Amino acid sequence: MSLNANQDGPLDRAFAILDFVAGQLKAVTAADIAKNLDLPLPTAHRLIGNLESRGLIQRAAGTKRYVVGNALVVLAGKTIGSAFRTARRHAVLQNVAAEIGEQCEIGIVRNNVVAYVDSVRVTAPQGLQFDPGHSAPLYCTSTGKIYMSMLPAKAREKLVRSFQMEKHTDRTITDPDTLLCVLEQTRSAGWARTNEEYVKGVVGCAVPILAPDGTLIACLGVSVPAARVTYEELQRFREPLMNAAILLSETILQADSDFA
């Protein structure tokens, strides 16, 4: 992917580097960046150095290859969170919560934890409430399972085996091999469920919100007391959540006329 004549300024080149690095499944060298963006190698090194100094890209541990930096990950999370906090998208969330009669929430993954950016509650609070600003582990949440299931197999296994999995309830999955099996099932099913794995007495499920190219943007989920809805009964939420996720995916690509 080379830059065209109208995209040859320093800022264009910097954004092109960030876009290229973020789109790769593995760390890349300065030479990879220069070649793919049709940049002179000295220019690529200079821009990479500027981006690295700002934490937007960083070297993979023990190598001279580059991956996205922590500052870019945080910025991406804030950007996605802000994009979902609009009246139009909140209305979609309100509608699906009203349709299924349970709390619904939108979650993203930031720094290997699930961060919730919006939620709608339609009943009196019971059990776990995923309100905006709340965070939760990847391995025992439906959103986390979807995120991990969509990673390439090697990256998924490496991430799972890096966890120090705390047993939040007697149903929390703490064995890496078991979790990897669940993630493979999640990948095949296209949605995820949790069975009292984070908070005792609370079950939940989530579906992915995807960009047109299939990239995971966020997840739409529901949390409900197991006394009211059993783990097996979560199946009935799948279709309305999927429909709402499609609407959310469509609105994320449209300019909003409101600034709620």
Image (cartoon, rainbow, N blue to C red):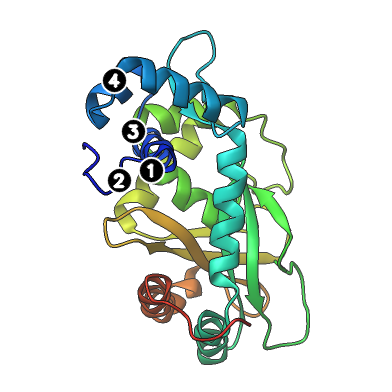
Q: Which amino acid does label 3 sit on?
A: Gln
Between 147 and 46, the one lying in front of the other is 46
Residue that carries the numbered disc 4 in the rendered image: 40
Q: Which amino acid does label 4 sit on?
A: Pro
User: Where is mark 1, residue-wise?
Assistant: 12
Task: Give the Cα separation between the discs numbered 4 and 1.
Answer: 15 Å
Q: How far apart are marks 4 and 3 (CA)?
A: 20 Å
Mark 4, Cα crowd under 10 Å, few <14 / some 14-19 / many 20+, is few
Q: Residue 7 carries which label?
A: 2
Check disc 2 and give the amino acid type: Gln
Q: Is mark 3 on a helix, strand or loop?
A: loop
In the depicted view, which residue is nearer to us: 80 or 159?
A: 80
**Residue at coordinates 74% horizontally, 46% vertically from top-left?**
168
Q: In the picture, residue 22 is in which quadrant? A: top left
Q: Name the residue at 62% across, 56% down.
A: 78
**Tag 3 or tag 4, which sits nearer the N-term?**
3
Badge number at residue 24? 3
Q: Which of marks 1 and 2 is nearer the N terminus?
A: 2
* Camera-nearest label, 3 or 2: 2
Circle nearer the N terminus (3, 2)? 2
Q: Is mark 2 on a helix, strand or loop?
A: loop
In this view, 219 is above or below 104: above
The quarter of the image holding the C terminus is: bottom right
Whether the residues at callouts 1 and 2 have beta carbons within 8 Å, the answer is yes
